[in-house]
Image (cartoon, rainbow, N blue to C red):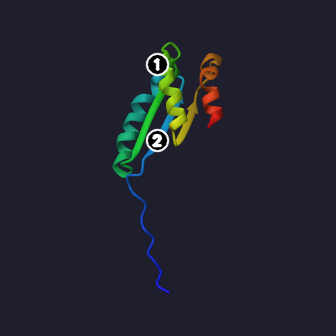
Amino acid sequence: MMLKRTTPADAAAPVRVVVVTMDSHLAGAADAAGRALRRELPGLELVVHAADEWCSDEAALRDCLDDIARGDIVVATMLFLEEHIRAVLPALAAR
């Protein structure tokens, strides 16, 4: 029987990583990490949503909730204030 060689996965397979955090302090580091990682993972999309932006902006909160729903990997970090947690908890729990 002739075995079929394993076909490599598409290197550009999209992977959407969503980081939900308290403030924008991670944004610069996440942007730099995203640029570096995209050299090896061209399909990587890394987005950061900070509560200091979406807690007073309904459009930013909708974007955050939409990204939580669509993310392949979702990381929630440093959400200490109850109003911040309350805003995203249903979307996180649905994941």
Residue 41 percent coordinates (x, y): 39, 50
Circle 2 sits on which residue?
16
Quarter-of-image position of residue 68: top right
Q: Residue at x 46, y 25 (%)?
A: 25
Q: Residue at x 43, y 60 (%)?
A: 9
Q: Secondary structure at mark 2?
A: strand
Under mark 2, the amino acid is: Arg
Residue 54 percent coordinates (x, y): 50, 19
Vertical placement of 17 versus 28: above or below?
Answer: below
Circle 1 sits on which residue?
59
Vertical placement of 29 versus 83: above or below?
Answer: below
Residue 20 percent coordinates (x, y): 53, 29
Q: CA distance from mark 1 to mark 2?
A: 20 Å
Badge 1 vs badge 2, beta-carbon distance below 8 Å: no
Figure label count: 2
Residue 31 percent coordinates (x, y): 38, 34
Q: Residue at x 46, y 84 (%)?
A: 2
**Mark number for residue 15?**
none
Under mark 1, the amino acid is: Ala
